[in-house]
Amino acid sequence: MTTAKQPAKPKQNVGAWVVWIVVGLIVVVCVGSSLFNRDSGGTTVPAPAADERADTVPLLAQATASQGICYGWRLEESFLSPVSVGSNLGDGVAVEEDDRCPRWVQVRARIMYTAESSESSDSATITVTGSGDFSRADLYAVQTGLTRFGLHEDVFVDDPGWAICRAAVALPLLVAETGAAPPAATPTADPGAVAAPLPDTGSDFWRDRWGTVLAAAGLLLVAVLLITVGFVQRGRQRAATPAGRFRGAR
């Protein structure tokens, strides 16, 4: 009596193992990038670009020559960590405690970026300080006057480097309006230069959440791969059964 031959078991698909390895790598990379972005990259305050600083210094120098007052800027992260300082004396040179500047005015911005997991919002604190011969009322008038140039907290949060340089350039005009100094001479600039537009004060969604979006896209790709592998393996299993071979022969 002849024993019925058992159907051969389908061989393990090596390609499936490769797909699973790729899936694992995608998950690790996506989750890791999300965590890295949430904890570090998203809370870094960018400094003004090199060309922004280079354009600001000569404008402040012209105002200083006209009014006899030094002007500067100071951009800080939370916890008072300096990001950028500069003045009419040059990029990286502060006006505070400098013997060349007996009279000075400085705009100071402290930016706080919070992690994505935090319930707190990003914030900016802008203050104007000056030497002792300026009254508090005059400095406060200069500080509040910055909003007339569109330099409110949201702009500092969205583009702190651009905003701090723009605020520094506005100081001579605002100081003159208080009567604490004569009007500054009209600054000369390159005729071919184009004034930079105000930055978009929209949401900072992409800056804070690019890692999360990348992780979601990776997980979606994983789901598609899993579904595809499942259909392929199911088709091979059905083709390997006796009923499947019988239907195929017929």
Image: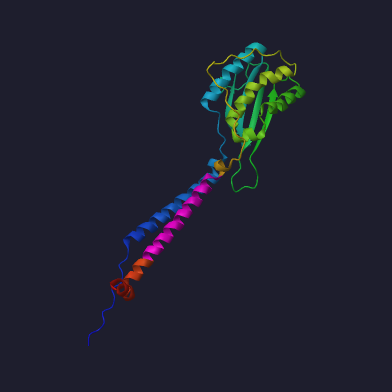
Residue 37 in picture, x, y percent from top left: 52, 44
Measured along the vertical axis of the image, is residue 1 above or below residue 34? below
Residue nearest the viewer, comparing 78 with 118: 118
Residue for point 63% across, 40% down: 122
Position in image of residue 144 (x %, y %): 72, 27
- Give the answer, above or below, for where 35 lies relative to 7: above
Residue 227 spot, x, y in % from top left:
43, 61
Q: Quadrant of residue 155?
A: top right
Residue extending farthest to the bottom is: 1
- Tell me which colouring the rendered structure shows: rainbow
- Residue 96 visible? The answer is no
Viewer-closest of 174 and 98 = 174
The image quarter containing residue 153 is top right
Relative vertical location of residue 220 with respect to residue 129 in this rendering, above or below:
below
196 relative position to 26: left or right: right
**Direction from residue 151 to residue 9 in the image, left or right:** left
Quarter assignment of residue 141: top right
Which stretch is magenta?
209-233
Residue 149 placement, left or right of 31: right
Residue 191 appears at what percent x and percent y? Answer: 54, 15
| Residue 140 magenta-highlighted | no
Q: Is residue 210 magenta?
A: yes
Most common secondary structure along the magenta stretch: helix
